[in-house]
Image (cartoon, rainbow, N blue to C red):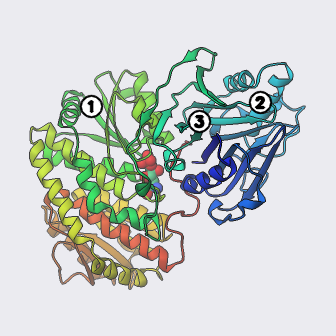
Amino acid sequence: MCGIIGYIGPRNGTEVVIDGLKKLEYRGYDSWGIAIKGNPSLSVHKQVGKISDFDDLASLPPSSVAVGHTRWATNGSVTKANAHPHTCCRGKVAVVHNGIIENFQELKQELRSHHFVSETDTEIIAHLIEDNLSAGMHFKDAVTNALTRLEGRFAVVAVSADSKNVVAARKGSPLVIGIGKDEYFIASDIPAFLEHTRDVIFLDDGDVATISDGISFTDFEGGVVHREPVEITWNVEQASLNGHEHYMIKEILEQRSTVGLAVDQDDAKVLKVAKMINEAYGTFFIGCGTAGKVGLVGSYIFSTVAKKHVNAVVGSEFPSYHDFLTPKTLLVCISQSGETADTLEAIEVAKKKGCKVVSIVNVMGSTMLRMSDEYILCNSGPEKAVCSTKVTTAQIALLTLLAYACVGRLEEGKRLLNSVSLKLDVMLDGQYLDEIRFLAKKLAGHESMYIIGRGLNYPMALEGAIKMQEVPYIHAEGFAGGELKHGPIALIEDGTPCIALVANDGVKNEILINALEIKSRGGFIIGISPKDNDIFDFWIPVPDVAIASPIVNIIPIQLLSYFTALEKNCDPDKPRNLAKSVTVK
Ligand code: AGP
């Protein structure tokens, strides 16, 4: 939520920052802004709307130092005044911020002699720094001291008209520094500067980086900290559209290879995590949104393959389980970004009880990964569309692999998942896409639809509903097939579209009966299944992959979501009200 990018170096920082903001737009797209350091002044430019719509770079002054921000509104509505950067009364200090300052009202009261122009929590940081500068502190100390006053999660970058230093700090929200030749990039996420460098330093919580013609690190108390760069493996092609119209379709199609890449792990690491699960007394799969549905499908996979009970809980609800936690409890946290605030809070709660934490994440260096005792990377490359697709199936594959590893059948698990990967490569051809596009034309006119599944595919019915909600804005709901007759079937009218997820498994006949119950009441049945059936009004074939059916069954719904969004003229990559990385609770 919210993207930050800063530049210090010999190039035109204004251009680097505007370009970086465009690459970070998936983190927030309500409004954007940039602070450009002149000599000895700062100019701030802000706009409501998407940075991708801005094409007037020439209207902005060039500079070797600039800091920008693309916003997803939390505190304060979507207005130019609330867009970042925020400045102090004299316009000498500019601040960009990602996160939430919980005690901002209290601090604002204390700063009432200052002139506030926005409703945001961020603006208080600029005024706190201003007070510290007036008290005679150097810029770096003025920023650091101001940050010690803040409660909550934040990543902050501050720039001053009167100092050559740019100061960046984090507590709970991501910040990564790219190291180029005599130049530095500061960003919320690596894709912002990936075309310039792959050498990065991930800031830890409590780190303050001071950057001018060199870089140094301290903690919030001023103690020196040493941080070494690491080389990241993502490349520019992975982070760009690469000929596709949208990231969403690019990422859906990348599932031809990402399931295989997810499974390509260090065996020792997988076995170590499997051992942790086997030795735990109470394992929780934690995630939010789609990652929460992955956790739920994981609990079915563990039940079936590893004969193990695992609790699947959404991140925001997990703190309510704190009474049951002991040092033998294990959390397996599932997240694309590794920055989801609700899941991070679950980890904090668990850590207080001495629990162990494993994370399954896609972003190297993310907060979740670094809070965990062990981690497994999804290896999917950057996922930029707000709607999670390729990482979802990579995470399901990894939980499947772990379930097999828990019962000493790792190789069998790998063989199954690698065969799924090959089948997806065949499945996702042009004709397949055309058929789903045809169905999308029919669906686009409907306001509501339902998705049913049983067993392993019940969580996929829930996940399918998220796909149809967040991108084409269809009121979609997922149900366990058996639950229909307990209420939801009353919603079925003549022509109501309903997707039935029918795998070749032990609940096949039951889910077909549920689909028939809907059809008998006028429902239009879209069957996703390895085999056609008379009950289906429209059949979407998928390969028969046994226990891995959730992986192949969700992909047609991802495609349906994408093509229906196109039919309805919705932006598939930037759905309204959403952001890719949900860093607030
Ligand atoms: C997925 O399509 C959603 N945009 C959303 O539910 C997402 O999965 C959720 O916010 C969790 O994000 P994470 O995987 O980065 O933790």
Determine whether, in the image, residue 197 is placed left or right of residue 220: left
Residue 51 in picture, x, y percent from top left: 65, 60
Q: Secondary structure at mark 1?
A: loop
Examine the rendered structure and indicate whether residue 548 appears above or below residue 228: below
Examine the rendered structure and indicate whether residue 42 appears above or below residue 51: above
Mark nearer the N terminus (1 vs 3) = 3
Residue 368 in picture, x, y percent from top left: 43, 35
User: In this figure, which residue is indicated by the disc labeled 1?
Assistant: 282
Q: Residue at x 42, y 61 (%)?
A: 466
Asked if the residue at tag 2 contacts the one at tag 1, i.e. Cβ–Cβ closer than 8 Å, the answer is: no
Asked if the residue at tag 2 contacts the one at tag 3, i.e. Cβ–Cβ closer than 8 Å, the answer is: no
- Can you tell me whether the CB of the residue at mark 1 lies under 8 Å from the nearest atom of ligand 1? no
Between residue 186 and residue 536, name the one nearer to us: 186
User: In this figure, which residue is indicated by the disc labeled 2?
Assistant: 163
Residue 450 in picture, x, y percent from top left: 37, 70
Q: CA distance from mark 1 to mark 2?
A: 53 Å
| Res 19 quadrant in image | bottom right
